[in-house]
Amino acid sequence: MTDLDQLVTESRNERTKQLDQKSTEEILTIINEEDQTVALQVQKAIPEIIAVVEKIVASFKRGGRLFYVGAGTSGRIGTLDASECPPTFSTDPQMVRGLIAGGQEAVFRSVEGAEDDEGMGITDMAQNQVTASDIVIGITANGGAPYVIGALKEARKRGAATVAFACNRKAVINDYADMHITVEVGPEVVTGSTRMKAGTAQKLVLNMLTTTAMIKLGKVYDNLMVDMQPLNAKLTERAKRIIQTAADCTREEAEELFSRSGGHPKVAIVMHRCGVNRERALELLAQTDGFVQRAIEQGF
């Protein structure tokens, strides 16, 4: 068992003592001030994050998958990031997976003892048939969740790339992974409540990992989300606005391009910019690995 006395995430925050005696405004101000320190700690980890992004991209290019593995808040944040990739980047739901100790039920309510089950972490890797093509990121604030350790052990055994992501430099999981991301956010506002600053750091880093990886895979053109799935009215409207902006056309032209492209912004943009039909636009994108700028250059 991890010695909590040695972990900064479990230590007392001297700046938030007597919190229960403060006004609502004072409490909110303190929380906000503590939250502002998180991004600066994430900034320090950028070199580690760069290395992990490159591994993720390499995994995707050889047909591998990204697995987030965590317990409690860490598992929920991993599940959230994974679930947002398909609508945002049109990825296969199997491409980025979130696994949480206790299974799907634990996403919505605590499953007592699940994070202490190292064997379940091993089982989850086996059931998902993790291979050497995949990358597994173990996420745990204090760095000692047995479920996560079990998953990393098994993933390593299967040849997958492994990453330990914790908020303590003395994290036990560092011994079970090839690569490390450490964002030491310090003591929480409420001692031990790692859903706060640690959770915020995890959300920021996971956003960085998948967003940057998807940009490197050609799913963003300029700074526009061009590989999205228009699954509802809001997203359909967003797709049309993106087409209008990227193609530098009128609203009416964007509407027509959206329809002719089958609702795919990337295809619509290439169609307009190169003056080609849908089939030719698809060919150009296929020839350039889905990068819109390269497809446009090749289409001229």
Image: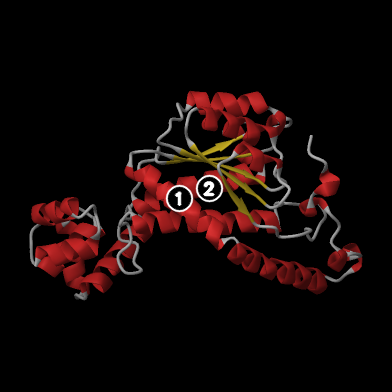
Q: Which residue corresponds to the image point at 58% horizontal and 34% vertical from the top-left?
A: 152
Label for residue 84?
1
Residue 153 image offset from top left, x and y in percent: 59, 31
Question: Are there few (<14), some (14-19), or many (20+) residues within 10 Å of tag 2?
Answer: some
For the question of whether residue 103 can be seen, the reply is: no
In this rendering, is residue 61 above or below 129? Answer: below
Residue 246: quadrant of the picture: bottom left
Question: Are there few (<14), some (14-19), or many (20+) residues within 10 Å of tag 1?
Answer: some
Q: Amino acid at mark 2?
A: Leu
Q: Which residue corresponds to the image point at 15% horizontal and 69% vertical from the top-left?
A: 273
In what element is the residue under mark 2?
helix
Quadrant where the C terminus lies? bottom left
Residue 223: quadrant of the picture: bottom left
Quadrant where the N terminus lies? top right
Is 131 left, or right, of 281 in this rendering? right
Residue 15 image offset from top left, x and y in percent: 85, 68
Q: Amino acid at mark 1?
A: Glu
- Circles 2, 1 touching at the beta carbon (< 8 Å): yes
In what element is the residue under mark 1?
helix
Label for residue 80?
2
Is 286 left, or right, of 48 in this rendering? left
Q: Which residue corresponds to the image point at 43% horizontal and 58% vertical from the top-left?
A: 212
In this rendering, is residue 7 above or below 134? Answer: below
The span from disc 2 to disc 1 (Cα, nearest Å) is 6 Å
Label for residue 46?
none
Residue 95 image offset from top left, x and y in percent: 39, 41
Residue 124 image offset from top left, x and y in percent: 54, 27
